[in-house]
Image: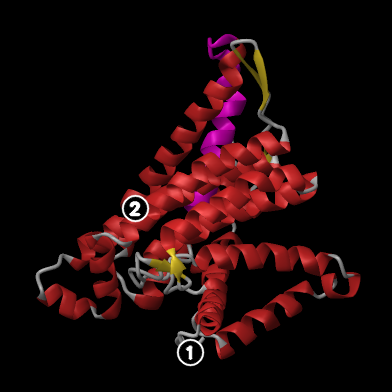
Amino acid sequence: MSDETVLGLPVRRTALVVFAVLVVAPFVLPTFQTYVLSEVLVLALFATGFNLLYGYTGLLSFGHAMFFGGAGYALGIFLRDVAPSLPFGGATPLVAFVIAAVLGVVVATAIAVPVGYLSVRLEEIYFAMLTLSFSMALYTIVNQNYFGVTNGSDGILVLLDTANLFGFQLALYDRVTYYFIILLVVAPSMYILWRVANSPFGLVSEAIRENSERASGLGIDVRRHQWAAFVLSAVFTGIAGVLVAPLHSSLSPGASLHWSISAEPVIMTVFGGPYSFVGPAVGALFYRYIRWGITQFPMLEAHWQLVFGTLILVIVVFAPRGVSGLLKWAVNRVRGDGGESA
């Protein structure tokens, strides 16, 4: 996972080009496609945060929905119950959103600390099943509305308003406006994740993934490092969770906390390639747009799980490094470098 190239291309130059394209995109895309691209950005952060634990540290979690949905619910409940009483005048909608978003990430982190501490004491399938159990426990609590604040299976509406900043009207609910809010959060988050992945912390994570016993023999506190990776992964998953709730304008247990939501970053990461930093982001792009493409054909839409499952099977069998591996191979071939096998 080199910090010098992405898919065989210079990292900084590629990042600047991608960022420039993302800045221009909403001005040339239809409104619905701007919404889809917003989802891609959130899913890319979700999957990349997840991959810090899976692709780098070697721990497969089936419970990341608890951070994704937990952060979203914290934001939604705050905006519904607390935000109307905040004393910030016309700026209240924006200030409330920022406070709620920070609170959501704090809640995701608070959940991750004890859950991660307990989970990393197990390995492989046992770790995966324990994270799944914790996640489904939170799903049950929210779905049954035990504390009377989650509204059960009916969920919560998350509607942003217009903020008045020094006489300037900022419609937070506008698709293009909210797209740029997402971009301004996702871009630095991805940069921080990239720095973490290419830091000594990331190298130690890879060592643990390859051989945890040898890493322990070298003096590394494996469990402590895995716990730290677990919490960091949850933090960025929580950021994705607070961004997606206003994008969808609603929260529900089935769409935020169900085990199937935990499966999404797994699918995107495997599809894109878990051993490349950009693999999960590439997987998110293909995952969302393939899903959209399938909806354009009623016959395929009627059996979309079969179609999508077949595509994943083909990628896993013929391109174990995922779509990012295929793209890197193609770039190297074009440049005449030969390249690795896809």
Magenta residues, start to end: 64-89
Q: Does residue 20 show up?
A: yes
Q: Quadrant of residue 125?
A: bottom left
Q: Which mark is residue 240?
A: none
Q: Front-most of 271 and 330?
A: 330
Secondary structure that dominates the magenta span? helix
Residue name at image x 57 percent, y 17 percent:
92
Q: Quadrant of residue 23?
A: top right
Judging by the rendered image, the residue that carries numbered circle 2 is 231
The quadrant of the image that shows the N terminus is: bottom left
Q: Front-most of 295 and 188?
A: 188
For residue 289, side relative to residue 133 (left or right): right
Query: Helix or strand or loop: what does disc 2 sit on?
Result: helix
Q: Quadrant of residue 317?
A: bottom right
Q: Does residue 137 show up?
A: no
Circle 2 packing at 10 Å, graded few (<14), some (14-19), many (20+), is: many
Where is residue 176? Give x, y as percent. Answer: 70, 38
Judging by the rendered image, the residue that carries numbered circle 1 is 341
Where is residue 270? Give x, y as percent. Answer: 53, 75
